Image: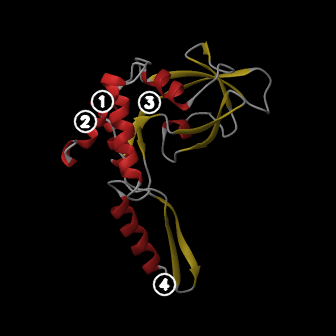
Amino acid sequence: IIQSEDRLEEMISLINNRYVEPIDEEELYQNGINGILKTLDPHSYYINSGDVAETNESLSGNYKGLGIEFNIYNDTLTVISMVKGGPAEASHLAIGDQIIELEGENIAGLGLTNDLIKSKLKNIPTDTIRLSVKRSTENGLIDLQLHRSSVPFYSLDAHYMIASDIGYIRINRFSATTFDEFHAALLQLKSDGM
């Protein structure tokens, strides 16, 4: 008989001892915890110990990086936006640029994933990152250097007046700076007649 407070522990122990193939016990725990949390609401989720620093970084309101947002199209890293006030914005990088080389190594066409790119960027020991990009308006590759530095993580996408007495504020994420950003936008809109 399994005691109610030991159900997950007992179940994983049974699977570990009697399942026909070897299992990854830690993965079972994480999947079990995530399965339980999924039944609560869409905002509850488990953060494993390896991802805590990265999660806290995104909640702090800034992080050390390049300030590039990208998508992977046809196995090529493509710049889709740059964080306002970040290092990428200050460089000659442009939206639509395709990043072909990172630190002299070809990264295009290699079955890229977000995790692979993050790992490659984290493993560069210096704060100066060398990129070679393909731009649709240029022939050949353009060599650039970006310098990792503090990148602000803004919570507000926009704030403006939509009528003479109605203001609009859009929050795109929550972080440690959300309240201050919202308050500053609210004061600005009030001074504009909201």
- Residue 102 found in image quarter: top right
What residue sits 34% from the left and 56% below the top? Answer: 177
Q: Which labelled disc corresponds to residue 10?
A: 2
Q: Earlier in the sequence, mark 3 or mark 1?
A: 1
Spatial CA span between label 1 and label 4: 66 Å
Residue farthest to the bottom, as pictured: 165
As helix, strand or loop, the secondary structure at mark 2 comes to: helix
10 Å crowding of disc 4: few (<14), some (14-19), many (20+): few
Q: Nearer the viewer, residue 144 or 50?
A: 50
Amino acid type assigned to the residue bearing label 1 in the image:
Leu
Q: Which labelled disc corresponds to residue 14?
A: 1
Residue farthest to the top, as pictured: 104
Amino acid type assigned to the residue bearing label 4 in the image:
Gly
As helix, strand or loop, the secondary structure at mark 1 comes to: helix
As helix, strand or loop, the secondary structure at mark 4 comes to: loop
10 Å crowding of disc 2: few (<14), some (14-19), many (20+): some
Q: Which labelled disc corresponds to residue 193?
A: 4
Q: Earlier in the sequence, mark 4 or mark 3?
A: 3
